[in-house]
Image (spheres, helix red, strand yellow):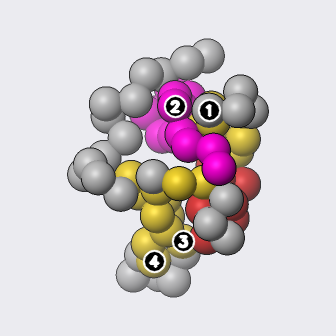
Amino acid sequence: METVVALHRNHFGEIISFVTSGGRIISYQKAVMEAANGAIKGVQTIEDSYGNLLLSPEAEQSFDQYPDLF
């Protein structure tokens, strides 16, 4: 099972993609889908007040500790 090892943010600071331990670069939405299906460990999906699924690390409060790779 893969984990998130890095991420990529746009110029607004929003996360747009993730790098997995398997070397894949996946979009935010693809990561949400895979986390919801249990294919990525160490992250969880949460639902916002509008019903949208968001990705959150399980152990930490944010993704700030992950390196930003381009």
The percent coordinates of residue 45 (x first, y second) are 49, 68
Q: Can residue 10 be seen in this view?
A: no
**N-term mark: 1 or 3:** 1
Q: Can residue 60 be seen in this view?
A: yes
Residue appearing at x 60%, y 54% in the figure: 40
Give the vertical position of 23 relative to 35 (above or below). above
CA gap between label 3 and label 4 equals: 5 Å
Mark 3 near mark 4, Cβ–Cβ under 8 Å? yes
The residue labelled by disc 2 is: 5
**N-term mark: 3 or 4:** 4
Mark 2 near mark 1, Cβ–Cβ under 8 Å? yes
Q: Is disc 3 surrounded by few (<14), some (14 to 19) or many (20+) residues within 10 Å?
A: some
Picture quadrant of residue 46: bottom left
Residue appearing at x 45%, y 52% in the figure: 42
Secondary structure beneath dot 1 equals: loop
CA gap between label 1 and label 3 equals: 22 Å
The residue labelled by disc 1 is: 21
The residue labelled by disc 3 is: 53
Q: Verify whether residue 7 appears in magenta.
A: yes
Q: Residue 47 carries which label?
A: 4
